[in-house]
Amino acid sequence: MFEQLGLIGCGLMGGSFALALKQAGLVNRVVGYSKSPSTTDRARQLGVIDVEAPSALLAVAGADIVLVAVPVSATEATLKAIKHLVTPQMLVMDVGSTKADVVQAARRALRDQVGSFVPAHPITGREVSGVEHADAELYSGRQVILTPTERTLTAQLQKAEEVWTALGCRVTSMSPESHDEAFAAVSHLPHLLAFSLVNSITGQAQADTFLSLAGPGFRDFTRIAASDPKVWRDVLLANRDELLAQSKLFQQALSQLENAIRTDDAQALEDMLTLASETRAHWRMGAQRKKSP
Ligand SMILES: NC(=O)C1=CN([C@@H]2O[C@H](COP(=O)(O)OP(=O)(O)OC[C@H]3O[C@@H](n4cnc5c(N)ncnc54)[C@H](O)[C@@H]3O)[C@@H](O)[C@H]2O)C=CC1
Ligand SMILES: O=C(O)C(=O)Cc1ccc(O)cc1
């Protein structure tokens, strides 16, 4: 399907995309660039990329598909660096966790070539980062959200849908704003809470004892607190307004629970826990929630 993938950002997401394309027989050659030459070198040693490029621009030379898989704040500079080699035939995508900022960055950086860019967010990932953790199966069976704009070329959008579908993904489209509103609630806030819970424990004198006693509930709740700090610094700042709005709603829900505990209102507490317990017990990843009649 593709002759050459130009991969910018040879980490977990980019490396996994390269491996998945190769495994599916969808690309003949992968040329990669990462900011640190040792990462690019490691990606080649691991067989994730075939050729190391000394710059983002040279990773794009001769490519018919390009994936930008860098922390979201680096998107604009990366797209500016490659603009001169972006053609209307080329499919350029990202995998950033936020979309309104990425779309604005693409408009500013790519200007008349912005039609080649299809903003993408695969709803998969891990709390570990780096090319060592790249996995050809990471995308299989997962959702990918595309947030095309009025300038996105129909042919590029179709190609993007085809490539993600060929990797076993379910593709949906929405506006960048709707995307950021939803993911503030179900991804960015949970990460913020996991980071803050761990820090609230670490700040206590008995932190080591407490942590040594923790079990599977703590493990499950805080797994994502091990995520990459630079990647998440960018996400939390890029989606600031939606995230702060969700954080406020969360604090209200927490206050209601605290109030029921403080006033020993067992019925109110049980009702709130029942609502959450039933919602979570019926939740399935990627499935539409059925509203009760
Ligand atoms: N980690 C996850 O679970 C998910 C991450 N994402 C998004 O994927 C993107 C990449 O994240 P990961 O692969 O997890 O991070 P990562 O840290 O594993 O990989 C990022 C790579 O980009 C390189 N890099 C950083 N700045 C660069 C620049 N200016 N130019 C070229 N290379 C640069 C780094 O050296 C690293 O190799 C982020 O935008 C993140 O929001 C999306 C879905 C899931
Ligand atoms: O580790 C996990 O379970 C995640 O939640 C992965 C993840 C991280 C960032 C995204 O934008 C999408 C998915």
Image: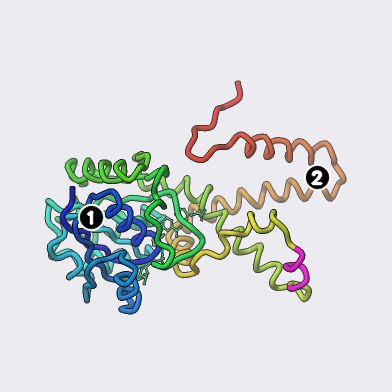
Placement of the C terminus among the 4 image quadrants = top right
Looking at the image, the residue that sits furthest to the right is 264
Q: Quadrant of residue 79?
A: bottom left
Instruction: Work out how far the residue at label 2 is from the one at label 1, CA to CA, in angstroms.
Output: 52 Å
Task: Based on the picture, tell me whether residue 257 belongs to the magenta stretch.
Answer: no
Looking at the image, the residue that sits furthest to the top is 293
x 22%, y 66%: residue: 31
**Residue 178 in sight in this render:** no
x 23%, y 72%: residue: 52
Please provide percent x and percent y for residue 252: 67, 48
- Dominant secondary structure of the magenta stretch? helix
Please provide percent x and percent y for residue 54: 22, 76
Q: Is residue 205 above or below residue 14?
A: below
x 47%, y 45%: residue: 182
Within-10-Å neighbours for mark 2: few <14, some 14–19, many 20+: some
Q: Is residue 20 above or below residue 208?
A: above
Residue position marked by numbered label 1 in the rendering? 92
Q: Which residues are magenta?
A: 208-213
Please provide percent x and percent y for residue 82: 19, 66
Q: Is residue 8 above or below residue 147?
A: below
Q: Residue type at mark 2: give it.
A: Ala
